[in-house]
Image (cartoon, rainbow, N blue to C red):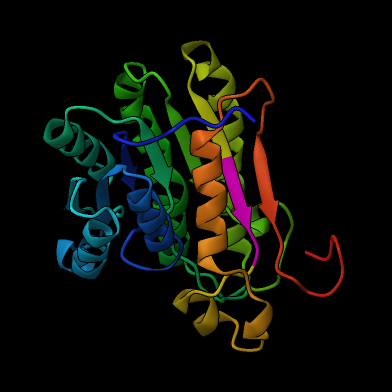
Amino acid sequence: MALQSIKDKTALVTGASRGIGKAIALALAAEGVNLALTARSAGALTATVDECRRRGHDNIRVEPFAADFLDPAAPGRLMEAAAARFGKIDFLINNAGCADNVTFEETTMEQWERFMSVNARAPFFLCQAALQFLRKSDAPVIINVSSVVGRQGYPNQAAYGASKHALLGFTKAMAREVQKDGIRVYALSPGATATDLIRSMRPDLDSSVLIAPEELAEIAVFLLKFRGNAMVDEINVRRDAGTPWAG
């Protein structure tokens, strides 16, 4: 299988203070990847940064960056700051997101704007800002973390689902446009994952069958390493509900 080393590459990972983003950051640190990690406040990243440095045996660079994606200018500022600090960007992993349980009828304009800003607009313009740096890499990859909700409708998640549909939509179009530059673009769409967010939103779910963030991190590492002739567009990951294709 055509798996390449990703040691000494540089990755920008958003939403890295907890959950899926933190698990991906830790997995990349173990592979020797230098990390630009983001959260709404740099202080929220302290634990992740320390753990990544230990996982990388202090042989990697790990830097925290604060970014509030409700600010339309945040993606551009973040990309420029990270590229200036590290000198290059090889991988972009758009993981930051927000969600809530709210009925279609009760969804407010403020909630709509928040979901679309964080889940769709921010990754769109981060990808755009990253292109100039990714084109200089010998193995450039973008991974946009979406959701199974971006594939099918779920009650009480109309606005969230719309934002993830938007994410998947531009990911597909962008992938075709940047293929000529050798940039591989993937969507990773997990189902219910064992994160604080899911536990607060869906306390009814059996935690023993939720997807572990570390499982998703392993998939992300595989996608970053894979440079074969086969093309992977999207990986849908379902929780173990006891029935294949159950959603």
**Does the magenta-highlighted stretch encompass residue 35?**
no
Question: Most extreme residue toward the bottom, as rendered?
Answer: 204
Residue 2 drawn above or below residue 162 = above
Examine the rendering and report whether any part of residue 170 can be seen.
Answer: no
Count the numbered circles shown: 0
Name the quadrant containing residue 176.
top right
The overriding secondary structure of the stretch rendered in magenta is: strand
Measuring from the top left, give residue 189's x and y in whole percent. 62, 52
Q: Quadrant of the N terminus?
A: top right
Extent of the magenta region: 187-191
Q: Tell me: 10 left or right of 214.
A: left
Q: Residue 235: image x %, image y %? A: 66, 46
Left or right: where does residue 70 sit relative to residue 59?
right
**Residue drawn at (41%, 54%) of the image:** 27
Q: Residue at x 43, y 68 (%)?
A: 19
Q: Is residue 167 left or right of residue 58?
A: right
Q: Nearer the viewer, residue 98 or 8?
A: 8
Occupied quadrant, residue 61:
top left
Task: Tell which residue pokes out farthest to the left in this image.
Answer: 85
**Nearer to me, 107 or 9:** 9
Where is residue 9 drawn, in percent x and y?
Answer: 32, 33
Describe residue 28's horizontal placement relative to residue 221 as left or right.
Answer: left
Residues 50 and 245: in front is 50
Q: Residue furthest top?
A: 180
Q: Nearer the viewer, residue 127 or 19?
A: 19
In the image, is residue 226 above or below residue 44? above
Q: Is residue 198 visible?
A: yes
Q: Residue at position x 23%, y 55% from top?
A: 57
Q: Residue at x 34, y 30 (%)?
A: 90
Quarter of the image that includes the C terminus: bottom right
